[in-house]
Amino acid sequence: MDFRVALAIGLPIGLGLAAMGTALGLGKAVGSAMEAIGRQPEASNKIQMALILGCAFIEAITIYVLVYAFVMAGKL
């Protein structure tokens, strides 16, 4: 198997796994934040700020993988 074939197979699989992990992470984070706000509505501003920061970091993982996939696709 040539390295081009391995890249052509591995890049979409890796990107899909990263997107799936990001979706699961975001779902868990948002669900937990909504539960926390329901328990303590007076702390909603602090919870929301932490949620936004956490979501940005979670999204960054998929963006990094997408950029890496584009860079490596140039090798095909």
Image (cartoon, grey):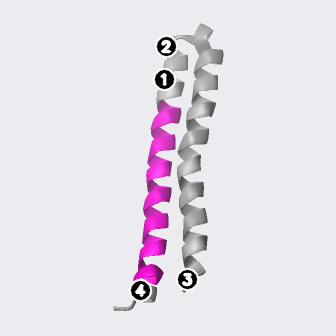
Q: Main secondary structure of the magenta part?
A: helix
> Given contact means CB atoms under 8 Å apart, are the residues at marks 3 and 4 in contact?
yes
Q: CA distance from mark 3 to mark 4?
A: 9 Å
* Kind of residue at badge 2: Arg
Cβ–Cβ under 8 Å for marks 2 and 1: yes
Does 62 appear above or below 26?
Answer: below
Q: Secondary structure at mark 3?
A: loop
Circle 2 crowding by C-alpha within 10 Å: few under 14, some 14–19, many from 20: few
Q: Tell me the kind of residue under disc 1.
A: Glu
Q: Which mark is residue 75?
A: 3
Q: Earlier in the sequence, mark 3 or mark 1?
A: 1
- Circle number at residue 35: 1
Outermost residue, bottom direction?
A: 1
Image point (48%, 23%), residue name: 35
Identify the residue at image location x=61%, y=40%: 56
The residue that label 4 is drawn on is 3
| Left/right of residue 67 with respect to residue 8 in the rendered view | right
